[in-house]
Amino acid sequence: MNRQELAEFAPADPATHKRNLATFRRPGGDVAALAVVQIFCFLSLARLEPRFFIIHFYQLMPYVAILLLVGYGQQRWAYMIGPLVSVAWFGLAYMAGLLGSAVERLRSIENFAPSANLVAMLAVVTAIMAVLMTVLSRIHWVRECSGREQAWRAFFVSLGIVLVYYGILLRWFWDMIPDA
C-alpha cells in the first residue's frame, strides 16, 4: 500500500470524530460510559474464562442496550433498566459468593495464578461499576424523569424485561452445572 491508499482510510473531516463521541456528551453520557466499562469487563471475563463465554457474552447485552438507548435519546429507559440490571447482577454475584471469593483472592494475591487474580479484579471492578450505574441512573431519573406520569409504567416494563433476562441467564447457568 502506498501513502495515498492509507490516507483514504482516515476520516477527512475532523467533525466525524466529534460526531462519534456525541453519545458521551448527551444527558446520560456518564451512564453510557459506565455501560462501556461494563461491556469491556464482561468481554475480558469471556476471554479469561472460556467455559463461561456464553454467560459473560449474555451478561454484556443489557449494557449494549443501555448504550444504544442513551445514543438514541431514550435516556429514561436507560435510567430505569441500568439500575435494575446492576442490582440484580450484584445480588446474584453476592449470593453465589463471587464477590466474597474475589475479595479474598485479591487479599492473598500471591497465592493464585495471574489469570485468577485478573478475574477477581474484574469481578470487583464490575461490582463497583454496578453500584455507580445504580447511583448515577437514580440521580438522573430523579432530575429528569420522576415527575412524569408514565414513571411507574417504565418501571414495571423495565422490571419485567430484567426478570425475563435474568430468568434466562439463571436457566442457562443451571443447565451448565453437571448432574452429580
Image (tube, grey):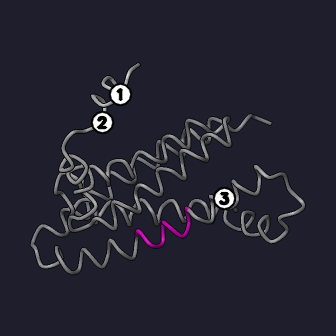
User: What label does residue 96 carry, if any?
Assistant: 3
Q: CA distance from mark 2 to mark 3?
A: 47 Å
Near mark 2 (Cα within 10 A), the count class, few <14, some 14-19 or many ≥20, is: few
Element on which disc 1 rests: helix
Q: Position of residue 118 (x, y in %)?
A: 71, 55
Range of the magenta residues?
Answer: 126-133
Q: Which residue is mark 2?
A: 10
Dot 1 corresponds to which residue?
6
Q: What residue sits 22% from the left and 54% below the top?
A: 18
Is 145 situated left or right of 46 in this image?
left
> Could you say whether the residue bearing mark 2 is in a helix, strand or loop?
loop
Look at label 2 and name its amino acid: Ala
Q: Residue at x 27, y 55 (%)?
A: 21
In-front residue for pair 160/105? 105
Residue 84 got which mark? none
Closest to the observer: 1 or 120? 1
How far apart marks 3 and 1 lie (CA) works out to 50 Å
Q: Residue furthest right?
A: 111
The mark that comes first in sequence, 2 or 3, is: 2
Q: Are marks 1 and 2 in contact (CB under 8 Å)?
A: yes
C-alpha separation, residue under disc 1 versus residue under disc 2: 7 Å
Q: Position of residue 35 (x, y in %)?
A: 40, 57
Mark 3 secondary-structure assignment: loop
Which three-letter amino acid code belongs to the residue tagged 3? Answer: Ala
